[in-house]
Structure formats: structure tokens, C-alpha cells
Amino acid sequence: MDIRALRMRLNLTQRQFAGWFGFPVATLRHWERGNRRPAGTALVLLHVIHENPREVLAAVRKARIRDPGSLARIEPLMSLRAPPGFGYRPPPLRPRRGR
């Protein structure tokens, strides 16, 4: 199973995918790199997500609404933009002419 392709098809970042479905981000990265392979219930869940992602997302939403503290919080995406002034370099000093 190509987990990265599945995540990209759902248009989710690694953090979002991991947060929504309860996987550690590091584990998801290992799966996508091919260092490890999912097994057991994780593999079953990935197949269910692949076959019917809307139903799984709906079930996750319902679980979050019914029992708010039971599932891990989904981290909002942080901006990838640099803060104002970051990378600013003053212009180089020019030697004076006509001395």
C-alpha cells in the first residue's frame, strides 16, 4: 500500500493525517519512506481509509464530538512563511569616491 499516495489523495499533510487517524507522525514518516511497514490494526485501518475515506473521517468526527477528550488533538498547521524582517541584509558599504 502506498501510504503517501493515500495521504496526498486526501489532500492532508503528514501531521493532519496522523492526527485524524491516530498515528504518530514519526511512524507515518517511516511508513512513507519505506523504513517500516504497517501491521495489525494500523494496516487494517489504512485499508479501510483507502476504500472509504469519507466514512472513516465521518466516524472520527462523530467520536470527537461525542467524547471530546478521548482522541488526540489535531495540531493546526503552522505558517511556513518567514517572520517579517527575516533574512534582511543591509546593503553593502560602498567606498567613497573623490577623496
Image (spheres, helix red, strand yellow):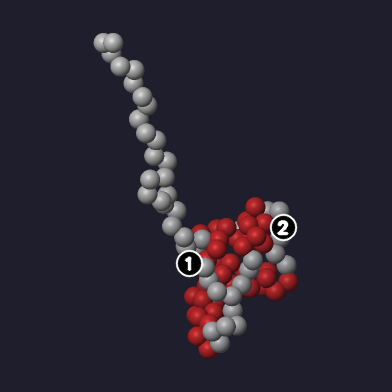
User: For residue 85, what is the image quadrant?
Assistant: top left
Percent coordinates x, y for residue 29 in the rendering:
63, 57
Three-letter amino acid code of the residue under disc 2:
Arg
Reply above or below: 19 against 81: below
Residue found farthest to the left: 98
Q: Which mark is residue 26?
A: none
Q: Nearer the observer, disc 2 or disc 1? A: 1
Reply above or below: 29 against 18: above
Residue designated by label 2? 36
Alpha carbons under labels 2 and 1: distance apart: 27 Å
Mark 2 or mark 1, which has the lower sequence index?
2
Three-letter amino acid code of the residue under disc 1:
Pro
Residue found farthest to the top: 99
Q: For the residue labelled by badge 2, is the local secondary structure a helix, a strand or a loop? A: loop
Binning the other alpha carbons within 10 Å of mark 1 as few (below 14), some (14 to 19) or many (20 upward) gives: few
Instruction: Tell me the residue at 59%/79% (across/down).
Output: 71
Q: Which mark is residue 76?
A: 1
For this view, does 3 lie left or right of residue 91? Answer: right
Q: Are marks 2 and 1 in contact (CB under 8 Å)?
A: no
Whether residue 76 is visible here, answered yes or no, is yes
Instruction: Tell me the residue at 35%/30% (across/down).
Output: 91
Q: For the residue labelled by badge 1, is the local secondary structure a helix, a strand or a loop? A: loop
Instruction: Tell me the residue at 50%/85% (across/down).
Output: 65
Q: Tell me the quarter of the image containing the N terminus.
A: bottom right
Instruction: Tell me the residue at 72%/57% (across/down).
Output: 36
Percent coordinates x, y for residue 32 in the rendering:
63, 56
User: For residue 95, what is the image quadrant?
Assistant: top left
Binning the other alpha carbons within 10 Å of mark 2 as few (below 14), some (14 to 19) or many (20 upward) gives: few
